[in-house]
Every structure is written in C-alpha cells, then in structure tokens.
Amino acid sequence: MSLTAADVGLTIGKLPSGPHNAITDVTGIAVGHRTIHRPPTIHTGVTAIVPRDIGPDAPIRANLFAGNGFGKLIGATQLAELGQLESPILLTATMSAFRAADALVGWLLDDPRFADVTTFNPVVGECNDGYLSHIRARPVREVDVRAALAAATDGPVAQGNVGAGTGTGALGFKAGIGSASRVIDVEGRSHVVGGLVQANFGGLLRIGGTTIAAPPPTPPDDGSCMIVIATDAPVDARQLGRIARRAVFGLGRVGASYSHGSGDYAIALTTSTEQPLPDHRLDPVFAATLDVVEEMVLNALLAATTVTGVAGRRLTALTDTPQWAEFLADRGDCRR
C-alpha cells in the first residue's frame, strides 16, 4: 500500500476529506490507469478520468486555466470556448499525446451513444517524462488507452508510479499521480471537491513552511503539471475557470517554480446540472481546491518509488532520502 500525507500525520487545512480522499469521491467520476514499465528505458503510461454520464447530448460544464502554456493540451481551445467537456480526460507522455487522442476518438466512435456524431473534441493532457523514459519511442498504443479507460472505477485511486505518472518527477524527486478530496458545506448543503495531479514540475519542495532539497543530480527546473479538479457543486463554466486558477495557484504552496519550460494546466469540471451558486458563495470551493492541490502533490511524492531510467538517469523517491528522515525527526506536529 502506497504512503500518503495522512499516513505521516500531514494534515492540510481544516476541511475533512471524502471516503477515498480522491477525485472519485465526486459521484460520477471514475479513474483508470495503464502503466507501461519496461526497465530500464520505458517508464510511462496513461491515466483516464472518466465522467460516467457524459454523452453527445450531455456535455458537462468545464473550463481550464494555463498557468504557463508550454504544453500540448489537446482540445483546449474548444474546452475554453464552449465551457463544455464532451470526452473523458486522458493524461500521458508528451510525445504520446497525439496517439492517445486518436485512440480516444476511436473509443468514442465505438460507443453506441455517439453513433450519430461526426465530430469529437478529445481532451488529452501531457507531461514530459523523457528524463526517465525513452520518450521518442512513443510507446503508448491504442490498446493502452483502451485499457486505461476500461480500468476506470469509482473506488480508491492508485498513486505514485502508475499510469501517466510512471516516469514523472517533481521538485527534484520521483513523483507521479496524486489525488485528494475535501467535503465542504455551501449554503447548508454538502459538496465534494476532488482532484488528480500528474506531477512533473520544478522548484524547491516546501511542506508546511519547511523546505526539503532534493539530492543531486536533479532534472532541469522545468517539466509540466496537469491538474484535474472535479466537484458536484453547482457552478457554471466561468466559475470553473476561477476554480482552475486556484488549482494552479495551489502549486505554489509546495514550492513550484513555474519555469519557462513548464506547462502548468488545470481543468475544472462539475457533475452538477443545477443553477450555479452566486460568486460570493464560492469561497469554500476555492479553499478546498487549494488544500486538495497541496495534498495531492504530496501524495504523488510520498507514494512514488525510486526509478532508474534511460541513460542511467535516476529520480529518488522522497521517502528514500536522508532529508525526509531528518524532516520526520524534526517536524513535531505538522498540522496547521
């Protein structure tokens, strides 16, 4: 079982988490992974975030924010223009994103719900896992995309070196996929905010105000980060853009550098079809989003294991470093 922030007493914020502390705590959201791990040169994969009720006549409200647009987010312009998501969201490696998009279109064409549709907007995000994986080989195939989609469930989410996070690293350490959730109260009603991150960005790790430097050698201070935020709170597409901004802001809590070469994106969606909340009622959603992003990045780091990849390059897991042992010895009570 992989380690999480909660396992070591790291409590982020005051809001409670959902039963799985994952994006799947939002009813109607499923997650599946396909991990491609062929040492020493291939460490990559696909992660699928699947809204269960999506269809050609039932797109869901969504929006995005590009904190730094150095990336290949396929489907971004229509997502922003219409404020609607009409496909699952796939995450994978940079050079495999285009094959993944084509495979997603094939999957949609095979779905009877889309039998009369002649246009799709597949949404595929990516991170560059080329530090550890032979990215030019483009190892992701249609069978891998379909396997990730078929594996999607609404239960606990595997984290760390899985799916699209198999070969990624963040803040100088091995990272990967992370997820978290928060339960909020808005106008007397309970709602869930959940998130999933593909963490692959630079900076200096910060946990509760304490910085932890990665052991050398470390990859260049760039990379990317893909964040998906889901909620069942009634918000519209414009408001989801505001939520997506908070998600990218949340990376600053853990020490992100937002470098020139980092594609830092957030997609936010809601499963609700109700009338949206007034803007002045959104503060609990914003607060939950910030906490979710901070915790799921830590979860990605804590769940990851050390990997030696292509050309002998190595990313060490946070938990395998003396810096982590020192942090645990000195931290006392990490709650804040």
Image (cartoon, rainbow, N blue to C red):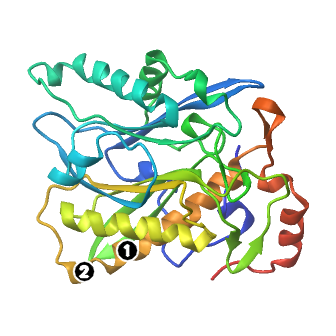
Residue 122 placement (x, y as % from top left): 29, 34
Q: Which mark is residue 320?
A: none
- Cα separation between marks 1 and 2: 10 Å
Q: Quadrant of the N terminus?
A: top right
Q: Quadrant of the C terminus?
A: bottom right
The kind of secondary structure element at disc 1 is helix
Q: Are marks 1 and 2 in contact (CB under 8 Å)?
A: no
**Residue 78's quadrant in the figure?**
top left
Who's the residue at 79% across and 66% down the image?
213
Q: Is residue 238 left or right of residue 259?
A: left
Three-letter amino acid code of the residue under disc 2: Arg
Who's the residue at 36% across and 29% down the image?
101
Q: Is residue 148 left or right of residue 281?
A: right
Q: Is residue 310 left or right of residue 230?
A: right
The kind of secondary structure element at disc 2 is helix
Who's the residue at 17% across and 52% down the image?
81
Who's the residue at 81% across and 55% down the image?
319
Classify 10 Å Cα crowding around label 2: few (below 14), some (14-19), many (20 and above): few
Residue 88 placement (x, y as % from top left): 32, 37
Residue 264 placement (x, y as % from top left): 47, 57
Q: Earlier in the sequence, mark 1 or mark 2?
A: 2
Classify 10 Å Cα crowding around label 1: few (below 14), some (14-19), many (20 and above): some
Q: Nearer the viewer, residue 215 or 294?
A: 215
Q: Which mark is residue 281?
A: 2
Residue on which disc 1 sits: 286
**Residue 134's quadrant in the figure?**
top right
Three-letter amino acid code of the residue under disc 1: Phe
**Residue 83's quadrant in the figure?**
bottom left
Q: Nearer the viewer, residue 310 or 325?
A: 310
**Against 184, is 150 above or below?**
above
Q: Is residue 7 left or right of residue 67?
A: right
